[in-house]
Amino acid sequence: MMSGSGGLGVDAKLVGLLTELEAGLGNHLRLTGGLASESGAVDPATAPLVGIVTPLDEIKMWSEVAFSDAAPRGARAAAAEVYRALEPLKARIENLERAEAEAADEEDALDLVDVIADCLDAAWHVGPGEPFSQRRAEHFMRATGSLLVGHAQRRLRSRRVWADAFRDVEGALRFCHRLLAKWEAATNELTSMHWADGARAWRGAPFAHAATRAAKARCDEVFKMREAQAELAKLLTAEEARSLALTEVLRPFAGLDPLQVSDYVAPLWDAARADHDSRVRPAEARISE
C-alpha cells in the first residue's frame, strides 16, 4: 500500500481502525479477561487480570466500569469511588512514563511512591464490601513495582555504568536503590501495619514483589563493585593500577544491563561476576600486603 509520500506505508484510515480495534480489545480484556459474560455485567473484584499490565490499565478499568451501562448501579457507584481514589495517580504516572531518564526529577519520583501509597489506602477502604479486592490490590502493587523498576532501568541506561567514573554514576545508583527500597517499605507498611486489622484486614503474609527486591539487590551489588574499584584506585599508585589492570576489572560486564535481572541472563551475569572477581583479586591482595 502506497503512502502519501510515495513510499511503502500504511493507509492512515487503516492505522486509525487498527488503533480503535486495539483500544476495544484492551477494554474487553480489562473488563472480562477475554471471557464472555452472559449478563454483560462486570464485577472488578473477580474479573481476570490478564489485561492489566500497568497501573494506568487498572485506573482505566475502574473508570470504564464506573461509566458502563452493563454494570449494575451499585457496581458503578463503587467503581466510581475506587476510580476517585486512584485518579490522582494518572497524570503523575503518565509524566513518569513520558519523561526522559535524564529529565525526570528524582524527588518527584520518590514523592510519587508516597502518593501511590495514599491512593492505594483510599481505594482499599472503599465500601461497602470490598470492591477493590486484595487480589486487585496485589496486582496493582506488582504492576507499580514493575513500573518503578523500569524507571530505574531507564535511569541507569542513560549512563555508562561500567565505563564512567564512579563519581559520575554514584548518584544514579543511589537514587535507583532508594526508589525501589522506598516502594518495598511502603507496600510492607500498608500490608503489615495499616491494613493488618480493622474492619477490613489484609489476609496472609505482607506483600512482597520479587522483581523489585531483585532489582534493588542488583543496584546494591553494582554500587559496591563500582565503589570498591574507586577505593582501590585511591590506594594504589598509578603504576600499580596499570600493572594490575585495574581499569579492566569491569570489562566482563560490558554489554550487560545492570538491572536486567532474570533467569535467562543469570548465567551471563554469574560468569561476568566470576571474571570480575578474579580480575580484582590481585589488586586486593596488593593492598593487603
Image: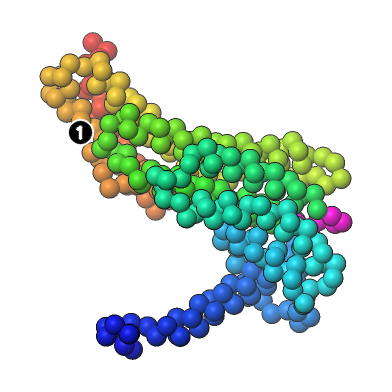
The residue sitting at the bottom extreme is: 1
Q: Element under label 1?
A: helix
Q: In which quarter of the image is residue 158?
A: top left
Q: What residue type is labelled 1?
A: Glu
Q: Using the image as rendered, state which of residue 128 and residue 1 is in the foreground.
A: 1
Asked if residue 39 lies in the magenta stretch, the reply is no
Q: Position of residue 41 (x, y in %)?
A: 77, 75
State the extent of the magenta-drawn residues as a range: 127-132
Q: Is residue 156 left or right of residue 31?
A: left
Is the C terminus in the top left, top right, bottom left or bottom right quadrant?
A: top left
Residue farthest toward the front in the current orientation of the protein? 5
Query: Looking at the image, how many numbered discs can be counted on the residues?
Result: 1
> Which residue does the image show at 22% across and 23% down from the upper left?
282
Residue 18 to residue 254: above or below: below
Q: Residues within 10 Å of mark 1 (few under 14, many from 20)?
A: few
**Which residue is situated farthest in the top direction here?**
289
Reply above or below: 122 against 38. Answer: above
Colour scheme of the rendered structure? rainbow
The spot of residue 63 in percent (x, y) is 70, 65
Q: Residue at x 58, y 51 (%)?
A: 92
Q: Name above or below for residue 79 compared with residue 282.
A: below
Does the rendering let one see residue 61?
yes
Q: Residue at x 80, y 44 (%)?
A: 201
Percent coordinates x, y for residue 109 in the rendering: 53, 42
- Quadrant of the snapshot with the N terminus: bottom left
Left or right of 192: which side holds 130?
A: right
In the rendered image, residue 188, in percent from the top left (x then y), is placed at 66, 38
Q: For residue 140, which quarter of the picture? A: bottom right
Answer yes or no: is residue 146 visible: no
Q: Mark 1 points at which residue?
A: 248
Magenta stretch, main secondary structure, is: loop
Q: Going by the image, does 220 lie left or right of 121?
A: left
